[in-house]
């Protein structure tokens, strides 16, 4: 073991998510891959996991141990809402996200004295950040795990940080996930005799189609009103939609504030000849 000396913050990786109310991605688990576990022991470095961030502390001498090594972690998503609320471009389990500090992009507004970088090509994680499990560096990383490890349960992402990139000051990286967007389908149950039903966005940003007759799987009839375009899901949505009836003397408000879509209730429908993800929102009368 090397002399510990004063501990310094060496590395921080923050994971953000547009779905969650506090903006942070919860429930992430980081598993050292390759020689990372050995390096952590050899340098007396300390990992801290908050569920949405990985922070690495160590003595100043830590950066001189295998300076050409690449630190790596398998990132697993353990929050049960993650698969349904995330617009993930990777087709799990055949693909994962490739988050390599060697390909990081400096964040807008970041300065040399306060350097922060994002680990994905665009504003959020996208198809450009996806790699198949058969990609050589990915396959090599997964092959270093124990039996019943990452190959049987592939991680969400592979995080790699070449040690040569880590400066004396802490290096800050960020990863941002976009929320999933779905077609919102209001399912009206019961008797709705009012004329010209419509769903209205009080912010005037979202348009809905006309009511259409539909049925549940058990054959029960309903009226369906769908958004014309996908709407982003949110843990605490600020959308304010009303159900109204267009009448000669002016609109009559039937439901002052409609419920919003939940991440877990998803279905697929053919809309305009295309398979689309749909959030069903049931309104009873």
Image (cartoon, grey):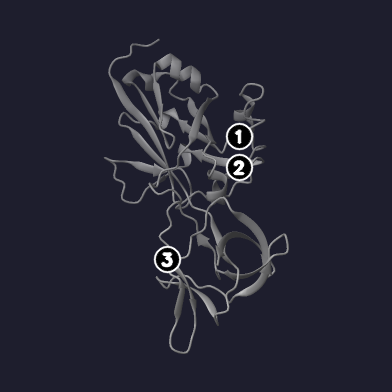
Q: CA distance from mark 2 to mark 1?
A: 8 Å
Asked if the residues shown at circle 2 and circle 1 are in contact, with their CB atoms under 8 angstroms apart, the answer is: yes
**Residue 188 position in % (x across, y down):** 58, 68
- Above or below residue 256? Residue 218 is above
**Residue 182 position in % (x across, y down):** 56, 60
Mark 1 or mark 3: whose residue is earlier in sequence? 1
* 34 with respect to 48 (left or right): right
Q: Alpha-carbon neighbours of circle 2 within 10 Å: few (<14), some, or many (≥20)?
A: many
Q: Residue at x 49, y 38 (%)?
A: 100
- Above or below residue 272? Residue 142 is above
On-image quarter of the C terminus: bottom right
**Which residue position is annotated with label 1?**
138
On-image quarter of the N terminus: top left
Instruction: Identify the secondary structure beneath mark 3.
Output: loop
Q: Nearer the viewer, mark 1 or mark 3?
A: 3
**Residue 268 position in % (x across, y down):** 66, 58
Along the viewing direction, whichever of 248 and 97 lies nearer the viewer: 248
Q: Alpha-carbon neighbours of circle 1 within 10 Å: few (<14), some, or many (≥20)?
A: some
Asked if the residues shown at circle 3 and circle 2 are in contact, with their CB atoms under 8 angstroms apart, the answer is: no
Marker disc for residue 240:
3
Instruction: Identify the secondary structure beneath mark 2.
Output: strand
**Which residue position is annotated with label 2?**
131
* 16 with respect to 271 (left or right): left
Along the viewing direction, whichever of 202 and 2 lies nearer the viewer: 202
Mark 2 or mark 1: whose residue is earlier in sequence? 2
Instruction: Identify the secondary structure beneath mark 1.
Output: helix
* 149 with respect to 24 (left or right): right
Q: Residue at x 34, y 18 (%)?
A: 61
């Amino acid at each position: 073991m090397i002399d510990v000396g004063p501990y310094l913050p060496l590395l921080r990786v923050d994971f953000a998510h547009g779905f969650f109310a506090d903006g942070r991605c919860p429930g992430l688990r980081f598993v050292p891959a390759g020689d990372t576990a050995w390096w952590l022991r050899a340098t007396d470095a300390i990992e801290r996991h908050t569920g949405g961030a990985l922070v690495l502390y160590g003595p100043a001498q830590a950066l001189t141990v295998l300076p050409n090594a690449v630190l790596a972690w398998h990132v697993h998503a353990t929050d049960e809402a993650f698969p349904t609320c995330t617009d993930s471009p990777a087709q799990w389990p055949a693909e994962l996200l490739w988050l390599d500090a060697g390909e990081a992009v400096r964040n807008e507004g970041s300065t040399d004295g306060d350097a922060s970088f994002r680990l994905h090509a665009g504003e959020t994680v996208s198809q450009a950040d996806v790699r198949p499990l058969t990609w050589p560096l990915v396959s090599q990383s997964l092959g270093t795990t124990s039996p019943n490890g990452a190959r049987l349960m592939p991680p969400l992402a592979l995080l790699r940080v070449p040690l040569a990139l880590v400066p004396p000051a802490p290096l800050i990286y960020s990863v941002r996930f976009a929320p999933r967007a779905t077609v919102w389908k209001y399912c009206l149950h019961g008797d709705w005799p009012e004329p010209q039903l419509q769903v209205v966005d009080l912010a005037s940003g979202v348009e809905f189609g006309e009511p259409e007759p539909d049925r549940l799987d058990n054959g029960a009839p309903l009226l369906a009103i769908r958004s014309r375009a996908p709407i982003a899901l949110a843990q605490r949505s600020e959308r304010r939609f009303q159900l109204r009836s267009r009448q000669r003397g002016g609109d009559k408000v039937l439901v002052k504030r409609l419920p919003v879509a939940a991440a877990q209730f998803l279905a697929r429908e053919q809309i305009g000849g295309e398979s689309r993800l749909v959030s069903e929102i049931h309104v009873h009368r």
